[in-house]
Image: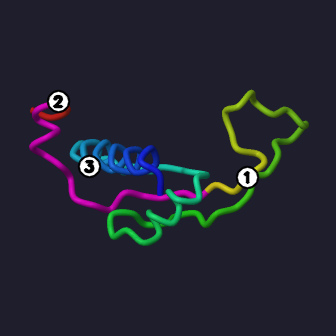
Amino acid sequence: MTLRVSVTLTLSEFVASLFVTTGKEYRSATTHPAMIRHRCKSQLWEMIRAPELSAAPMGGYVPARSAAWDRPTAGFRFVGPANREAAKVVGIIG
């Protein structure tokens, strides 16, 4: 795994731990094979959509670079602990 992917995973988990302090669910989708593998093995993530190709939209319109039409994406829900201390420091919660 490259350093770039490792930093991305760490940042993603940190942001998720802050977001869940609000009481809302944090979901994330990824196409990167290393991220998918990591999240499948991690106790912090639950897969909610197995890797699959997205269906092309009706009418053939494809938004510019905003979706992965040519590679599988997987969906995950963050089930790790909320980071209340960090959320206070950055002002997400009081």
Q: Nearer the viewer, mark 1 or mark 3?
A: 1
SS assignment at label 1: loop
SS assignment at label 2: loop
Q: Nearer the viewer, residue 10 or 85?
A: 10
Q: In the image, residue 70 lies at what x, y percent?
A: 78, 48
* 10 Å crowding of disc 2: few (<14), some (14-19), many (20+): few
Residue drawn at x 79%, y 51% as measured from the top left: 55
Q: In the image, residue 86 lies at what x, y percent?
A: 14, 40
> In the image, which residues are magenta?
74-89
Residue drawn at x 33%, y 64% as measured from the top left: 44
| Magenta stretch holds residue 54 | no
- From mark 2 to mark 1, how far is it between C-alphas? 35 Å
Q: Which residue is mark 1?
A: 71
Disc sitting over residue 17 in the figure? 3
- From mark 1 to mark 3, how far is it between C-alphas? 28 Å
Relative placement, left or right, of 83 versus 14 is left
- From mark 3 to mark 2, how far is it between C-alphas? 12 Å
Q: In the image, residue 78 lies at what x, y percent?
A: 37, 57
Q: The disc labelled 2 sits on which kind of residue?
A: Val
Q: Nearer the viewer, residue 15 or 26?
A: 15
Q: Which residue is mark 2?
A: 90
The quarter of the displayed image where residue 60 is located: top right
What quarter of the picture does the C terminus occupy?
top left
Of pointers 1 and 3, the one earlier in the residue sequence: 3
Of pointers 2 and 1, the one earlier in the residue sequence: 1
